Amino acid sequence: MSATAVSLRDAHAILHHQAAALLADPSRAHQLPPTLLWGPPGVGKSSVVRDVCTDLGIPLIDVRLSQREPVDLRGLPVPREDRVDWLLSGEWPRDPDSAGIILFDEITAVDRSLQVAAYELLLDRRLGDLYRVPDRWYLCAAGNREEDGAAALGMSSALANRFCHLEVAAELEPWLRWAQEQGLHPDVLGFLRYRPDCFLQLEGDLQRGWPSPRSWERVARQLTLAAETGLGDGPLQRIIEGLVGAGAAAELAAFRSWAGTLEDAEAMLRGRAPITIPERADQCYALCAALVYHLWRGPEGERTKRLDRFLEVTLALSSDFATMALIDAVGGAEGVTGERGQRIFAHPRFGEWAQTHGSALQRYLPSGQSQQAATA
Protein backbone atom coordinates (compact mmCIF):
# COMPACT_ATOMS: atom_id res chain seq x y z
CA MET A 1 0.00 0.00 0.00
CA SER A 2 1.39 3.40 -1.00
CA ALA A 3 1.87 6.13 1.56
CA THR A 4 -0.77 8.83 1.98
CA ALA A 5 0.40 12.03 0.33
CA VAL A 6 0.60 15.21 2.37
CA SER A 7 0.32 18.79 1.18
CA LEU A 8 3.22 21.19 1.41
CA ARG A 9 1.27 23.00 4.13
CA ASP A 10 1.07 19.79 6.18
CA ALA A 11 4.73 18.99 5.51
CA HIS A 12 5.61 22.50 6.71
CA ALA A 13 3.55 22.00 9.87
CA ILE A 14 5.22 18.66 10.65
CA LEU A 15 8.76 19.93 10.10
CA HIS A 16 7.99 23.10 12.05
CA HIS A 17 6.72 21.01 14.97
CA GLN A 18 9.77 18.73 15.01
CA ALA A 19 12.31 21.53 14.76
CA ALA A 20 10.48 23.69 17.31
CA ALA A 21 10.30 20.76 19.72
CA LEU A 22 14.05 20.35 19.45
CA LEU A 23 14.62 24.06 20.05
CA ALA A 24 12.46 23.90 23.17
CA ASP A 25 14.08 20.77 24.56
CA PRO A 26 17.46 19.72 23.08
CA SER A 27 17.35 16.46 25.06
CA ARG A 28 14.91 15.21 22.40
CA ALA A 29 17.71 15.12 19.80
CA HIS A 30 17.94 11.31 19.76
CA GLN A 31 14.18 10.82 20.13
CA LEU A 32 13.00 12.68 17.02
CA PRO A 33 13.57 10.75 13.78
CA PRO A 34 14.86 12.67 10.76
CA THR A 35 12.20 13.35 8.12
CA LEU A 36 12.53 12.35 4.46
CA LEU A 37 10.38 14.28 1.99
CA TRP A 38 9.52 12.28 -1.13
CA GLY A 39 8.05 13.81 -4.27
CA PRO A 40 8.55 14.81 -7.89
CA PRO A 41 11.19 17.39 -8.74
CA GLY A 42 10.03 20.98 -8.67
CA VAL A 43 7.22 20.39 -6.18
CA GLY A 44 8.85 22.50 -3.44
CA LYS A 45 10.41 19.99 -1.06
CA SER A 46 13.56 22.02 -0.44
CA SER A 47 11.59 25.26 -0.30
CA VAL A 48 9.35 24.05 2.50
CA VAL A 49 12.42 23.27 4.65
CA ARG A 50 13.81 26.70 3.88
CA ASP A 51 10.48 28.30 4.85
CA VAL A 52 10.48 26.47 8.20
CA CYS A 53 13.94 27.85 8.94
CA THR A 54 12.74 31.34 8.04
CA ASP A 55 9.71 31.01 10.31
CA LEU A 56 11.80 29.82 13.24
CA GLY A 57 14.65 32.25 12.59
CA ILE A 58 17.27 29.51 12.34
CA PRO A 59 19.89 28.77 9.63
CA LEU A 60 19.68 26.02 7.03
CA ILE A 61 22.63 23.90 5.91
CA ASP A 62 21.66 22.47 2.51
CA VAL A 63 23.87 19.49 1.70
CA ARG A 64 23.38 18.59 -1.99
CA LEU A 65 24.51 14.99 -1.85
CA SER A 66 24.58 14.56 -5.64
CA GLN A 67 27.44 17.09 -5.70
CA ARG A 68 29.41 15.45 -2.89
CA GLU A 69 31.86 12.63 -2.32
CA PRO A 70 31.95 10.37 0.75
CA VAL A 71 35.04 12.22 1.96
CA ASP A 72 32.96 15.43 2.15
CA LEU A 73 30.88 13.82 4.89
CA ARG A 74 33.40 11.58 6.64
CA GLY A 75 36.33 13.96 6.44
CA LEU A 76 39.75 13.87 4.85
CA PRO A 77 42.35 11.45 6.30
CA VAL A 78 45.67 13.14 7.09
CA PRO A 79 48.71 11.05 8.20
CA ARG A 80 50.28 12.25 11.49
CA GLU A 81 53.41 10.28 12.39
CA ASP A 82 52.06 6.89 13.57
CA ARG A 83 48.37 7.75 13.28
CA VAL A 84 45.75 9.24 10.94
CA ASP A 85 43.80 12.38 11.82
CA TRP A 86 40.62 13.43 10.07
CA LEU A 87 39.87 16.92 8.78
CA LEU A 88 36.15 17.56 8.79
CA SER A 89 34.26 19.95 6.57
CA GLY A 90 33.89 23.44 7.97
CA GLU A 91 30.16 23.51 7.12
CA TRP A 92 29.15 21.26 10.02
CA PRO A 93 27.95 23.32 13.00
CA ARG A 94 30.31 23.30 16.00
CA ASP A 95 28.75 25.63 18.56
CA PRO A 96 26.88 23.40 21.07
CA ASP A 97 24.35 26.19 21.67
CA SER A 98 23.62 26.81 17.99
CA ALA A 99 20.41 25.65 16.30
CA GLY A 100 19.20 25.00 12.77
CA ILE A 101 18.24 22.36 10.22
CA ILE A 102 20.57 20.22 8.12
CA LEU A 103 18.93 19.09 4.88
CA PHE A 104 20.47 16.17 2.97
CA ASP A 105 18.98 16.98 -0.41
CA GLU A 106 18.80 14.64 -3.43
CA ILE A 107 19.56 11.70 -1.18
CA THR A 108 18.04 9.24 -3.65
CA ALA A 109 20.25 10.51 -6.49
CA VAL A 110 23.53 9.23 -5.03
CA ASP A 111 25.11 5.81 -4.96
CA ARG A 112 25.20 3.56 -1.93
CA SER A 113 28.72 4.54 -0.88
CA LEU A 114 27.61 8.13 -0.29
CA GLN A 115 24.38 7.02 1.37
CA VAL A 116 26.41 4.86 3.75
CA ALA A 117 28.56 7.89 4.56
CA ALA A 118 25.39 9.64 5.74
CA TYR A 119 24.32 6.79 8.03
CA GLU A 120 26.20 7.91 11.12
CA LEU A 121 25.02 11.50 10.89
CA LEU A 122 21.39 10.52 10.35
CA LEU A 123 21.22 7.69 12.88
CA ASP A 124 23.71 8.62 15.59
CA ARG A 125 24.07 12.35 14.90
CA ARG A 126 27.84 11.94 14.93
CA LEU A 127 30.90 10.98 12.90
CA GLY A 128 32.77 8.49 15.04
CA ASP A 129 34.55 10.22 17.91
CA LEU A 130 35.45 13.22 15.74
CA TYR A 131 32.21 15.11 15.50
CA ARG A 132 28.76 15.31 17.10
CA VAL A 133 25.82 17.28 15.71
CA PRO A 134 24.72 19.88 18.29
CA ASP A 135 21.47 18.83 19.93
CA ARG A 136 19.38 21.74 18.67
CA TRP A 137 19.97 20.91 15.00
CA TYR A 138 17.22 18.93 13.29
CA LEU A 139 18.13 16.53 10.48
CA CYS A 140 15.99 15.92 7.38
CA ALA A 141 16.36 14.85 3.75
CA ALA A 142 14.60 15.10 0.39
CA GLY A 143 14.54 12.82 -2.61
CA ASN A 144 12.77 11.96 -5.83
CA ARG A 145 10.91 8.75 -6.56
CA GLU A 146 11.99 6.37 -9.30
CA GLU A 147 8.70 6.92 -11.18
CA ASP A 148 9.36 10.68 -11.41
CA GLY A 149 11.93 10.24 -14.16
CA ALA A 150 14.54 12.05 -12.09
CA ALA A 151 17.88 10.68 -10.99
CA ALA A 152 16.73 8.20 -8.34
CA LEU A 153 18.81 5.18 -7.39
CA GLY A 154 16.72 4.12 -4.41
CA MET A 155 18.11 3.57 -0.95
CA SER A 156 18.93 0.66 1.24
CA SER A 157 16.37 -0.56 3.75
CA ALA A 158 18.90 0.18 6.51
CA LEU A 159 18.97 3.87 5.62
CA ALA A 160 15.24 4.07 4.85
CA ASN A 161 14.44 2.74 8.30
CA ARG A 162 16.11 5.77 9.89
CA PHE A 163 13.51 8.20 8.55
CA CYS A 164 9.97 9.37 9.03
CA HIS A 165 8.77 9.28 5.40
CA LEU A 166 6.42 11.96 4.01
CA GLU A 167 5.08 11.74 0.47
CA VAL A 168 4.65 15.34 -0.71
CA ALA A 169 1.93 16.08 -3.25
CA ALA A 170 1.77 18.97 -5.72
CA GLU A 171 -1.50 20.78 -4.94
CA LEU A 172 -2.64 23.69 -7.04
CA GLU A 173 -4.82 25.60 -4.55
CA PRO A 174 -2.16 26.02 -1.83
CA TRP A 175 0.38 26.96 -4.50
CA LEU A 176 -1.97 29.62 -5.89
CA ARG A 177 -2.40 31.10 -2.40
CA TRP A 178 1.36 31.23 -2.00
CA ALA A 179 1.78 32.70 -5.49
CA GLN A 180 -0.72 35.47 -4.69
CA GLU A 181 1.17 36.29 -1.49
CA GLN A 182 4.39 36.47 -3.53
CA GLY A 183 2.79 38.79 -6.08
CA LEU A 184 3.46 36.45 -9.00
CA HIS A 185 2.15 37.51 -12.39
CA PRO A 186 -1.66 37.10 -12.56
CA ASP A 187 -1.58 35.62 -16.08
CA VAL A 188 0.06 32.47 -14.76
CA LEU A 189 -2.42 32.21 -11.88
CA GLY A 190 -5.41 32.72 -14.15
CA PHE A 191 -4.08 30.21 -16.69
CA LEU A 192 -3.53 27.50 -14.07
CA ARG A 193 -7.02 28.11 -12.73
CA TYR A 194 -8.29 27.56 -16.25
CA ARG A 195 -6.00 24.59 -17.03
CA PRO A 196 -5.14 22.94 -13.69
CA ASP A 197 -3.91 19.82 -15.50
CA CYS A 198 -0.94 21.91 -16.71
CA PHE A 199 0.27 22.51 -13.15
CA LEU A 200 2.43 19.37 -13.01
CA GLN A 201 3.04 17.11 -16.00
CA LEU A 202 5.50 14.24 -15.74
CA GLU A 203 4.81 12.89 -19.22
CA GLY A 204 6.88 13.75 -22.24
CA ASP A 205 10.54 14.75 -22.43
CA LEU A 206 11.66 15.37 -18.85
CA GLN A 207 15.16 16.22 -20.03
CA ARG A 208 13.81 19.54 -21.32
CA GLY A 209 11.54 22.13 -19.74
CA TRP A 210 8.31 20.74 -18.34
CA PRO A 211 5.46 22.07 -16.17
CA SER A 212 6.00 21.97 -12.41
CA PRO A 213 5.35 24.37 -9.52
CA ARG A 214 8.98 25.48 -9.70
CA SER A 215 8.92 26.15 -13.45
CA TRP A 216 5.60 28.04 -13.29
CA GLU A 217 7.04 30.31 -10.61
CA ARG A 218 9.93 31.06 -12.95
CA VAL A 219 7.55 31.71 -15.84
CA ALA A 220 5.61 34.19 -13.70
CA ARG A 221 8.78 36.01 -12.73
CA GLN A 222 9.90 36.09 -16.37
CA LEU A 223 6.58 37.69 -17.39
CA THR A 224 7.08 40.41 -14.80
CA LEU A 225 10.70 40.92 -15.86
CA ALA A 226 9.72 41.10 -19.54
CA ALA A 227 7.14 43.80 -18.78
CA GLU A 228 9.72 45.81 -16.84
CA THR A 229 12.50 45.51 -19.42
CA GLY A 230 10.51 45.55 -22.66
CA LEU A 231 11.55 42.07 -23.79
CA GLY A 232 9.83 41.17 -27.09
CA ASP A 233 7.18 38.50 -27.41
CA GLY A 234 9.39 36.23 -29.52
CA PRO A 235 12.32 35.92 -27.08
CA LEU A 236 9.89 35.75 -24.15
CA GLN A 237 8.05 32.83 -25.77
CA ARG A 238 11.33 30.97 -26.27
CA ILE A 239 12.16 31.46 -22.59
CA ILE A 240 8.75 30.14 -21.51
CA GLU A 241 9.14 27.13 -23.82
CA GLY A 242 12.49 26.47 -22.20
CA LEU A 243 10.87 26.47 -18.78
CA VAL A 244 7.62 24.52 -19.28
CA GLY A 245 7.93 22.99 -22.75
CA ALA A 246 6.43 23.95 -26.10
CA GLY A 247 2.92 22.59 -25.42
CA ALA A 248 2.26 24.39 -22.15
CA ALA A 249 3.97 27.53 -23.47
CA ALA A 250 1.67 27.61 -26.51
CA GLU A 251 -1.41 27.19 -24.32
CA LEU A 252 -0.28 30.00 -22.03
CA ALA A 253 0.37 32.24 -25.04
CA ALA A 254 -3.15 31.60 -26.36
CA PHE A 255 -4.60 32.30 -22.92
CA ARG A 256 -2.67 35.56 -22.63
CA SER A 257 -3.75 36.58 -26.12
CA TRP A 258 -7.44 36.28 -25.17
CA ALA A 259 -6.80 37.87 -21.78
CA GLY A 260 -5.12 40.81 -23.50
CA THR A 261 -8.41 41.83 -25.12
CA LEU A 262 -9.99 42.46 -21.70
CA GLU A 263 -10.58 45.86 -20.15
CA ASP A 264 -7.68 46.69 -17.82
CA ALA A 265 -8.55 45.18 -14.42
CA GLU A 266 -6.67 47.81 -12.42
CA ALA A 267 -8.40 50.62 -14.32
CA MET A 268 -11.70 48.87 -13.62
CA LEU A 269 -10.96 48.79 -9.88
CA ARG A 270 -10.00 52.47 -9.91
CA GLY A 271 -13.22 53.45 -11.68
CA ARG A 272 -11.36 54.54 -14.82
CA ALA A 273 -12.77 51.80 -17.06
CA PRO A 274 -16.28 50.42 -17.42
CA ILE A 275 -17.15 47.11 -15.78
CA THR A 276 -17.04 44.61 -18.62
CA ILE A 277 -17.70 40.92 -18.01
CA PRO A 278 -16.27 38.59 -20.68
CA GLU A 279 -18.25 35.71 -22.10
CA ARG A 280 -15.38 33.24 -22.46
CA ALA A 281 -14.44 31.10 -19.47
CA ASP A 282 -10.70 31.58 -19.97
CA GLN A 283 -11.17 35.35 -19.98
CA CYS A 284 -13.20 35.14 -16.76
CA TYR A 285 -10.35 33.25 -15.10
CA ALA A 286 -7.92 35.91 -16.33
CA LEU A 287 -10.16 38.73 -15.10
CA CYS A 288 -10.56 37.22 -11.63
CA ALA A 289 -6.81 36.65 -11.27
CA ALA A 290 -6.07 40.24 -12.33
CA LEU A 291 -8.72 41.69 -9.99
CA VAL A 292 -7.27 39.83 -6.99
CA TYR A 293 -3.72 40.79 -7.99
CA HIS A 294 -4.51 44.52 -8.09
CA LEU A 295 -7.06 44.71 -5.26
CA TRP A 296 -4.65 45.09 -2.34
CA ARG A 297 -1.76 46.69 -4.24
CA GLY A 298 -2.96 50.26 -4.56
CA PRO A 299 -2.34 53.05 -2.06
CA GLU A 300 -4.19 52.59 1.23
CA GLY A 301 -6.32 55.62 0.45
CA GLU A 302 -7.63 53.95 -2.71
CA ARG A 303 -8.40 50.56 -1.22
CA THR A 304 -11.90 51.41 -0.03
CA LYS A 305 -12.83 52.44 -3.56
CA ARG A 306 -11.07 49.42 -5.05
CA LEU A 307 -12.92 47.12 -2.68
CA ASP A 308 -16.24 48.73 -3.59
CA ARG A 309 -15.52 48.23 -7.28
CA PHE A 310 -14.27 44.68 -6.66
CA LEU A 311 -17.60 43.76 -5.09
CA GLU A 312 -19.44 45.54 -7.89
CA VAL A 313 -17.52 43.62 -10.58
CA THR A 314 -17.94 40.27 -8.87
CA LEU A 315 -21.66 40.94 -8.41
CA ALA A 316 -21.86 40.88 -12.19
CA LEU A 317 -19.98 37.58 -12.47
CA SER A 318 -21.50 34.13 -12.20
CA SER A 319 -21.57 32.83 -8.63
CA ASP A 320 -18.76 30.32 -9.19
CA PHE A 321 -16.35 32.93 -10.56
CA ALA A 322 -17.41 35.54 -8.02
CA THR A 323 -16.88 33.16 -5.10
CA MET A 324 -13.52 32.01 -6.46
CA ALA A 325 -12.37 35.63 -6.73
CA LEU A 326 -13.56 36.51 -3.23
CA ILE A 327 -11.90 33.50 -1.60
CA ASP A 328 -8.67 34.30 -3.45
CA ALA A 329 -8.96 37.93 -2.32
CA VAL A 330 -9.08 36.96 1.37
CA GLY A 331 -6.22 34.43 1.00
CA GLY A 332 -8.16 31.17 0.97
CA ALA A 333 -10.84 29.70 3.20
CA GLU A 334 -8.65 30.17 6.27
CA GLY A 335 -8.39 33.88 5.43
CA VAL A 336 -12.08 34.45 6.14
CA THR A 337 -11.29 35.26 9.76
CA GLY A 338 -8.27 37.39 8.85
CA GLU A 339 -7.97 41.12 8.39
CA ARG A 340 -8.79 41.05 4.68
CA GLY A 341 -11.77 38.78 5.16
CA GLN A 342 -13.20 40.96 7.90
CA ARG A 343 -12.66 44.05 5.80
CA ILE A 344 -14.64 42.58 2.91
CA PHE A 345 -17.43 41.18 5.07
CA ALA A 346 -17.84 44.49 6.89
CA HIS A 347 -18.20 46.41 3.63
CA PRO A 348 -21.66 47.93 3.11
CA ARG A 349 -22.05 46.21 -0.27
CA PHE A 350 -21.27 42.74 1.02
CA GLY A 351 -24.89 42.20 2.07
CA GLU A 352 -25.97 42.62 -1.55
CA TRP A 353 -23.10 40.35 -2.64
CA ALA A 354 -24.15 37.66 -0.15
CA GLN A 355 -27.74 37.76 -1.37
CA THR A 356 -26.53 37.13 -4.92
CA HIS A 357 -23.70 34.65 -4.36
CA GLY A 358 -24.11 33.49 -0.74
CA SER A 359 -25.21 29.95 -1.59
CA ALA A 360 -22.08 29.41 -3.69
CA LEU A 361 -19.89 30.83 -0.93
CA GLN A 362 -21.37 28.40 1.58
CA ARG A 363 -20.30 25.47 -0.62
CA TYR A 364 -16.69 26.65 -0.57
CA LEU A 365 -16.33 27.34 3.15
CA PRO A 366 -16.57 25.20 6.30
CA SER A 367 -19.92 25.62 8.07
CA GLY A 368 -18.60 27.85 10.87
CA GLN A 369 -16.80 30.20 8.51
CA SER A 370 -19.76 30.21 6.11
CA GLN A 371 -22.09 31.29 8.92
CA GLN A 372 -19.63 34.00 10.00
CA ALA A 373 -19.48 35.38 6.45
CA ALA A 374 -23.23 35.29 6.08
CA THR A 375 -23.81 37.26 9.29
CA ALA A 376 -20.88 39.69 8.94
Image (spheres, rainbow, N blue to C red):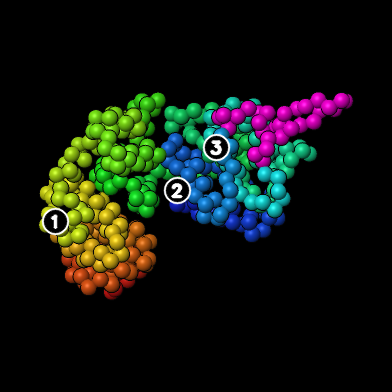
Lateral position of residue 208 relative to residue 315, left or right: right
Q: Nearer the viewer, mark 1 or mark 3?
A: 1
Q: Which residues are magenta?
A: 65-92
Amino acid on which the number 1 mark rests in the picture: Ala
Cα separation between marks 1 and 3: 50 Å
Name the one closer to the observer, 134 or 355. 134
Name the one closer to the observer, 27 or 235. 235
Q: Residue at x 46, y 39 (%)?
A: 39
Q: Nearer the viewer, mark 2 or mark 3?
A: 3
Position of the C terminus, as image quadrant, is bottom left
Q: Which mark is residue 273?
A: 1
Q: Residue furthest right?
A: 82
Lateral position of residue 278 relative to residue 7, left or right: left
Residue 334 position within the rendered picture, expressed as x and y whole percent measured from the top left: 38, 61
Is 81 inside the magenta-drawn segment?
yes
- In which quadrant of the rendered view does residue 327 lie? bottom left
Identify the secondary structure beneath mark 1.
Answer: loop
Identify the secondary structure beneath mark 3.
Answer: strand
